[in-house]
Image (tube, helix red, strand yellow):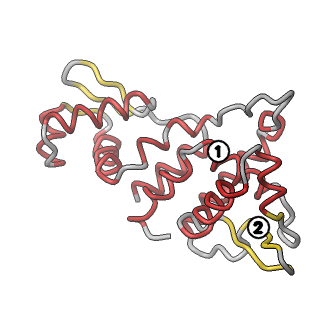
Amino acid sequence: MKTREIWKVCKKLSNEERLDVLRKVMSSPKEGGLPVGQIADAVRLGQPATSTYLAELQDVCGLVTSRRAGRYCLYYPAPDISDAKAVALFNALTRFFLAERTNWVPINGSRPQTPRFLSVLPALANATRARLLGFIRAERQTDRAKIVKATGLTELNMRRHLACIAACGLATVSGDDVAWCEPSDETSRILIDLALS
């Protein structure tokens, strides 16, 4: 996984339905895998949408792989992840899904609980915003004039990006001061480390 592509991965993972599909695939045995129909039924989506999500998780994120078994295509967690960044992301997501397994099982048709790290993904799903995040995190606390000068953003663009970053809980913005807020959960921290490396 190339550094410049991590924001694309964050963009794909910021969709709750796509994340449901990934959770179901990660809970499947690596040696067997699951067909699209079984995954679609488990996450209550149509097969075309599920197939599209699986293709994105495989081609863009590199977290899922597939093999043909007769007329079926079976999907399972990627066993051949070699890039250190992809491995870190894969392991963090796996630990999260295992730890939160009970919260992710729909009860009486209700949607699973939203994962904590989902709120940081919109901030990381934009290359410019990720660059801005990197600057704010490195400085820990800075003023807006310094941010504009260092990032080359216009005042209006900086305000829009700061609003998104603050809404995701990654920074506090008061007056002219901006302070970095380190996320508490492991998956968010790893995602940020990958996006800013």
**Residue 155: percent from the left, percent from the top?**
13, 35
Checking the image for residue 76, the label placed there is none
Q: Amino acid at mark 2?
A: Tyr
Checking the image for residue 75, the label placed there is 2
Q: 75 or 51, which is in the foreground?
A: 51
The residue sitting at 79% across, 79% down in the picture is 68
Horizontal side of residue 92 vs 99, given as left or right: left
Horizontal side of residue 178 vs 189, given as left or right: left
Q: Amino acid at mark 1?
A: Glu
Residue placed farthest to the top in the image? Answer: 175
Structural crowding at the residue carrying mark 2, measured as other residues with C-alpha within 10 Å and reported as few (<14), some (14–19) or many (≥20): many
The residue sitting at 85% across, 29% down in the picture is 107
Checking the image for residue 17, the label placed there is 1
For residue 88, what is the image quadrant?
bottom right
**Residue 175: percent from the left, percent from the top?**
21, 18
Work out whether mark 1 precedes mark 2 in sequence or the reverse, and give the earlier one.
Answer: 1
